[in-house]
């Protein structure tokens, strides 16, 4: 099981973890407490978790919910669930009560691994009948047979309808997600990536965790990003690269801390994904720190990366997320046929890293594909060198700090108040997060409801991060001929 830049990984995650467990290599270090986890120990702990689930009666391929922050226990749990032949169902801890309840219910998860720090969140959101997995089973329990086409991951992503869609990845597509990053970034067993993004997001899980598994490298895992501690953590754990979102790059740029010279001599590159990186921010970061930032693009549906700029001395085109690595990307016209070079159209992708389906949603699955091309919903153009430039979005997602937020989720929270006649959430430009959430409402005549009351509802149902920063009270919301509220006009008119 060796990394081959010319071909996608063969086998299952179990095969790859078993392979690296025969070495004395390090899988991860945890700078917050100084712990080191070797591949062999990671495999043994994963086997324990897999056997525990099997002994409890978990069936091959069924959803196992995971509510864990980044850390040793969370990493072991993810590996253990997938190693055992189950579908690791990653629960977004920042999603809010309603979305967490939906994911637990829709996935039909019968078992859940819940970290103590997540116990209160879980208790508020969990449906009845989900069994917490605690402790380990005694003795030997045979594991399910698994192969590359078996389900390995279920991760929920918001769409324009507001109802999260469950993206299903197999062992093959999950490993291919790590492979596309390893190919683009020339990852080797000597590399150590900084896992600062949550592994319940596709970026943290596939780019960093799967990238290390496929390449045989290692991770430095921290519980969450801290601008004041980032460089010290990076230095103490001897990283060679990191993957972050533009918000983090901006925080580091505007922070007071600086990396030491030893770290800078070792650090090969930083990687930016999840939303567009402002050209000025990228240039200012590189000027200050001397670290090349590689802008990329990926989706949950493609196990993260589809595009990346080359590493230096290759050509990096500022303002573009780069060229395709490990998959094919093309631009589709309105007729879903390939567009001419330089023409704007919808970005589409095909390759081994593409999802298998949306769970229990064949209509959405069919609508997402044009033949064997997955439609991303993003608009862009491709130049003569194959570099893609993103020009807009077909979908009405709000992208705040790299997190996709469906406007209708906010609409529905606002509509839960009986005095709301019309409601629509929309994106506004924000220097800190790229976009922020705002909403406009029309209330019933004589109503005394105020913004504080509506924000409290949103905070309770959605969490603070997804809630509007401002609510505008209007006598009428703009509508099209069919009576549909026009979100994009709200931002313009306000």
Image: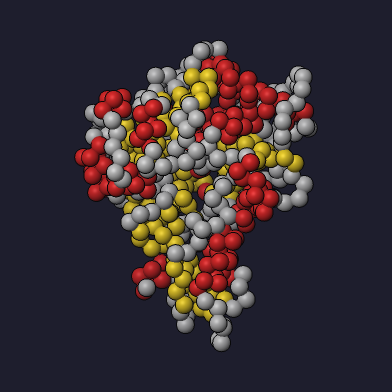
Residue 361: x and y in percent read 63, 49
The extreme bottom residue here reads 446
Residue placed farthest to the front in the image?
33
The image quadrant where one finds the C terminus is bottom left
- Where residue 224 appears, x then y in whole percent? 47, 41
Residue at x-position 35% and y-position 35% = 231
Q: Is residue 347 above or below residue 193?
A: below
Residue drawn 66% across the image and 53% down it: 125
Q: Looking at the image, can residue 382 be seen?
A: no
Which residue appears at 44% of the width and 57% of the height? Answer: 398
Task: Please state if 101 lies on the left or on the right of 323 as rendered.
Answer: right
Identify which residue, 178 or 232, lies in the foreground.
232
Q: Residue furthest left?
A: 287
Q: To which quarter of the image does residue 269 belong? A: top left
Q: Is residue 392 left or right of residue 16?
A: left
Across and down, in percent, residue 331 comes to 38, 46
Q: Is residue 207 above or below residue 227?
A: above
- How many marks do you count on the picture? 0
Q: Is 477 situated left or right of 386 in this image?
A: right
Picture colour scheme: secondary structure
Which residue is drawn at the image coordinates 54% and 70% (left, top)? 454
Q: Is residue 286 visible to the viewer in this orientation of the structure?
A: yes
Residue 412 percent coordinates (x, y)? 58, 66
- Viewer-proximal residue among 467 and 317: 467
Where 400 sits versus 243, above or below?
below
């Amino acid at each position: 099981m060796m990394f081959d830049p010319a071909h996608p990984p063969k086998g299952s995650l179990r095969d790859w973890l078993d392979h690296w467990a025969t070495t004395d290599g390090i899988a991860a270090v945890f700078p917050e407490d100084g712990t080191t986890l070797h591949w062999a120990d990671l495999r043994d702990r994963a086997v324990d978790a897999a056997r525990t689930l099997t002994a409890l009666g978990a069936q091959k391929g069924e959803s196992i919910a995971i509510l864990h922050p980044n850390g040793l226990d969370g990493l072991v749990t993810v590996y253990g669930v997938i190693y055992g032949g189950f579908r690791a169902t990653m629960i977004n801890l920042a999603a809010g009560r309603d979305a967490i309840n939906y994911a637990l219910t829709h996935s039909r998860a019968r078992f859940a691994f819940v970290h103590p720090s997540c116990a209160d969140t879980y208790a508020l959101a969990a449906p009845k009948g989900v069994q917490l997995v605690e402790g380990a089973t005694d003795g030997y329990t045979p594991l399910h047979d698994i192969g590359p086409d078996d389900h390995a991951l279920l991760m929920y992503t918001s769409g324009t309808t507001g109802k999260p869609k469950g993206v299903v990845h197999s062992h093959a597509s999950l490993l291919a997600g790590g492979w596309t990053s390893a190919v683009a970034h020339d990852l080797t067993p000597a590399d150590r990536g900084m896992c600062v993004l949550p592994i319940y997001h596709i970026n943290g899980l596939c780019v960093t965790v799967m990238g290390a598994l496929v390449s045989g490298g290692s991770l430095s895992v921290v519980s969450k990003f801290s601008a004041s501690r980032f460089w010290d953590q990076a230095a103490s754990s001897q990283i060679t690269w990191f993957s972050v979102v533009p918000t983090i790059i901006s925080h580091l740029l505007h922070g007071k801390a600086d990396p030491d010279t030893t770290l800078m001599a070792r650090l090969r590159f930083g990687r930016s994904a999840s939303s567009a990186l402002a050209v000025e921010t990228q240039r200012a970061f590189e000027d200050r720190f001397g670290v090349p930032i590689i802008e990329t693009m990926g989706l949950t549906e493609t196990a993260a990366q589809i595009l990346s700029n080359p590493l230096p001395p290759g050509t990096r085109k500022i303002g573009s997320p780069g060229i395709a690595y490990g998959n094919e990307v093309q631009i589709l016209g309105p007729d879903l046929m390939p567009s001419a070079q330089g023409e704007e159209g919808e970005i589409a992708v095909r390759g081994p890293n593409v999802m298998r389906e949306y769970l229990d949603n064949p209509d959405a699955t069919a609508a997402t594909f044009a033949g064997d091309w997955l439609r991303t919903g993003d608009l862009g153009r491709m130049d003569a060198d194959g570099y893609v430039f993103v020009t807009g979005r077909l979908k009405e997602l709000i992208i705040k700090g790299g997190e996709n937020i469906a406007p209708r989720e906010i609409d529905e929270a606002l509509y839960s108040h009986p005095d709301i006649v019309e409601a629509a959430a929309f994106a506004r430009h924000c220097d800190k997060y790229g976009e922020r959430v705002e909403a406009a409402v029309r209330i019933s005549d004589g109503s005394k409801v105020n913004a504080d009351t509506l924000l409290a509802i949103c905070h309770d149902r959605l969490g603070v991060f997804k809630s509007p920063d401002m609510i505008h009270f209007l006598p009428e919301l703009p509508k099209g001929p069919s009576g549909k509220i026009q979100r994009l006009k709200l931002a313009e008119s306000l």
